[in-house]
Amino acid sequence: MTETELTLCSESKQFLTFVLANEEYAVDILRVQEIRGWMPVTRIPGAPGYMKGVLNLRGEIIPIIDLRERFGFETKAYNHTTVVVFVWIKSEERQRSMGLVVDAVADTYDIANEAINPAPLMGEGLDPKFIEALATVEGKMVILLDIDYLLNADALACTQTGYLNE
């Protein structure tokens, strides 16, 4: 059974939520590999500013993306609540891991399918394709991210040499 078929069969889906600039965002919990506190990374010359660098996680070299900067939010000094959420990204025929720097992890939620609404049309000039849906959870709006689109979009597309294009 595929991931989509499993989602259609269940009445809810579980998400990990995290905070960026006082807003709550979520990713499918099945895509989360692990969560760690901020740790120094190796910078990659010529990479976009939001690409903080790479780190070695159990023998695998993983790119680290600051989502606050990727979304164009004001930068903030990393502190004791700053974490890296390692997620599985599907690109073409393979799966890879990437780290997302976020302000803090918030919670995990089981969100009922009927509480999940499609992302609204934003109008010309705005490209919210990385927003999979919106959900109201405990009285607050949570933005559900399409991490495959967000982290495979043009600026993050890896070339065959392994370097990132801007």
Image (cartoon, rainbow, N blue to C red):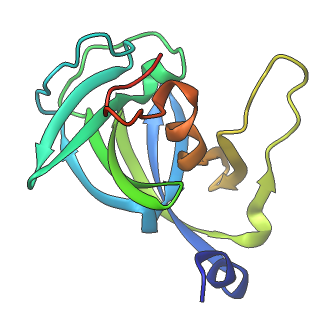
Q: Is residue 114 above or below residue 36?
A: below
Q: Judge left or right: residue 100 versus residue 7.
A: left
In which quarter of the view is residue 7 placed? bottom right
Q: Which residue is depicted at the point 75% across and 27% down?
A: 127
Residue 65: x and y in percent read 36, 30
Q: Give the number of marks.
A: 0
Q: Judge left or right: residue 149 versus residue 89.
A: right
Q: Which residue is depicted at the point 57% across and 28% down?
A: 154
Residue 71: x and y in percent read 54, 22
Front residue of 131 and 94: 94
In which quarter of the view is residue 61 placed? top left
Front residue of 161 and 69: 161
Q: Which residue is depicted at the point 11% across and 43% down?
A: 56
Residue 142: x and y in percent read 62, 46
Q: Judge left or right: residue 129 versus residue 27.
A: right
Q: Residue furthest front?
A: 160
Q: Judge left or right: residue 126 versus residue 55.
A: right
Front residue of 68 and 80: 68
Residue 26: x and y in percent read 53, 50
Front residue of 29 and 151: 151
* Quarter in which the N terminus is drawn: bottom right
In which quarter of the view is residue 2 placed? bottom right
Q: Which residue is depicted at the point 66% across and 75% down?
A: 4
